[in-house]
Image (cartoon, rainbow, N blue to C red):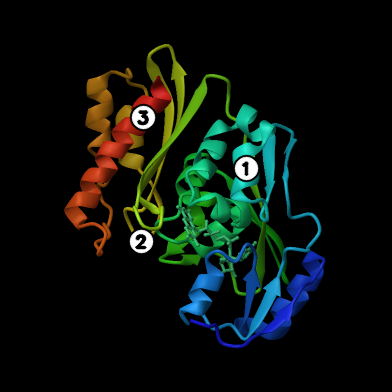
Amino acid sequence: MIASSFEYFAPTSVDEALALLSEHGDDAKILAGGHSLIPAMKLRLAEPAVLIDIQRVEGLKGVSESDGTLVIGALTTHHELESSNLVNQKVPILAQTAGEIGDVQVRNKGTIGGSLSHADPAADWPATILALDADLKIVGSGGERVIKATDFFEELYTTALEADEILTEVHVAVPAENTTGSYLKLHQVASGFALTGVAVVLTKSGDICENIAVGITGVSDVPYRASEVESALAGRALTADNIAAAAEKAADGVDILEDIHASEAYRSNLAKVYTRRAIEGAAS
Ligand SMILES: Cc1cc2nc3c(=O)[nH]c(=O)nc-3n(C[C@H](O)[C@H](O)[C@H](O)COP(=O)(O)OP(=O)(O)OC[C@H]3O[C@@H](n4cnc5c(N)ncnc54)[C@H](O)[C@@H]3O)c2cc1C
């Protein structure tokens, strides 16, 4: 299908983009890689009267390190994250997650900021960003604020972003040397999206799990931290039995999605199985 007609703006600075957002209010949408918004417009699920294309905005692309933190521009593509030496050296789970997204075309155009802002319940980034306890920098007409990833995802396709705000950066603290990570997903065969995606960030002391963070996507309307799994394993030996027992709690207290792709029971089981495997992967 063909999208409804719209006005197109291509600002070159954050200030200019914010001014356009304020001027056009709810009629306007930010356009980043376009790999979620354009399909939605073609299906007429989204009909913005104004598109504000931020691809030419200065300073929103690339990854750098500052004081032990990776600073990732919102316009950094999945491919750039997958192939960055800095990312692969410092926080390899980010590169691993990026490599699991869609196909080459999607990874070349889609951006981390677009994916997080869109908050598709089957998107990959949210699981990893939650497990890494990332901070998200947001800029709006009222100024700048930083929000924890755990406070960002609110409902299906809904985040803490206000209509006049832009996500500009993702901040990820470089984990300690005894910390490992693993992202594991079951791809939905047609789209590649996650039927279940589990990100584990694990700090070990010998065989003991000092600390663990587990982010899960694809299972519920909203991606979540599996806190029951985390508290069942933190401080305990990383034996197969302990890992399996903790992973059984992966869907505890969660409203599980049911759709044409998977029943509630199947998704709940997937969450447990992929959590166990992701923890085993990080632990080994
Ligand atoms: C065939 C196909 C397969 C895919 N497979 C996967 C997959 O396996 N896993 C996966 O996770 N994703 C997948 N995707 C989605 C892909 O990763 C998208 O690129 C991503 O979800 C959106 O990023 P984008 O840059 O394209 O954002 P856009 O489509 O440009 O924007 C998406 C939404 O976010 C808003 N937005 C964008 N950037 C910002 C910003 N900086 N601040 C505020 N709001 C912003 C827009 O207004 C819009 O509402 C797939 C897409 C396609 C077409």
Left of 139 or right of it: where is 211?
A: left
Vertical position of residue 6 compared to residue 259: above or below: below
Answer above or below: position of 251 versus 113: above
Q: Position of residue 224 (x, y in %)?
A: 39, 50
Question: Circle 1 is placed at which residue position?
Answer: 81
Residue most toward the top? 206
Q: Amino acid at mark 2?
A: Asp
Residue 250 visible, this orientation:
no
As rendered, which of 129 and 83 lies closer to the eye?
Answer: 83
Q: CA distance from mark 2 to mark 3?
A: 23 Å
Q: Nearer the viewer, mark 3 or mark 1?
A: 1
In space, the residues marked 3 and 1 are separated at their CA atoms by: 23 Å
Residue 18 shows up from this direction: yes
Q: Secondary structure at mark 1?
A: helix
Q: Are marks 1 and 2 in contact (CB under 8 Å)?
A: no
Image quarter in which the C terminus is found: top left
Say which residue label 3 marks: 279
Which amino acid does the dot numbered 1 rest on? Leu
Regarding mark 3 in the picture, which secondary structure is present there? helix
Residue hosting label 2: 221
Callouts 3 and 1 close, C-beta under 8 Å: no
Q: Position of residue 231 (x, y in %)?
A: 34, 34
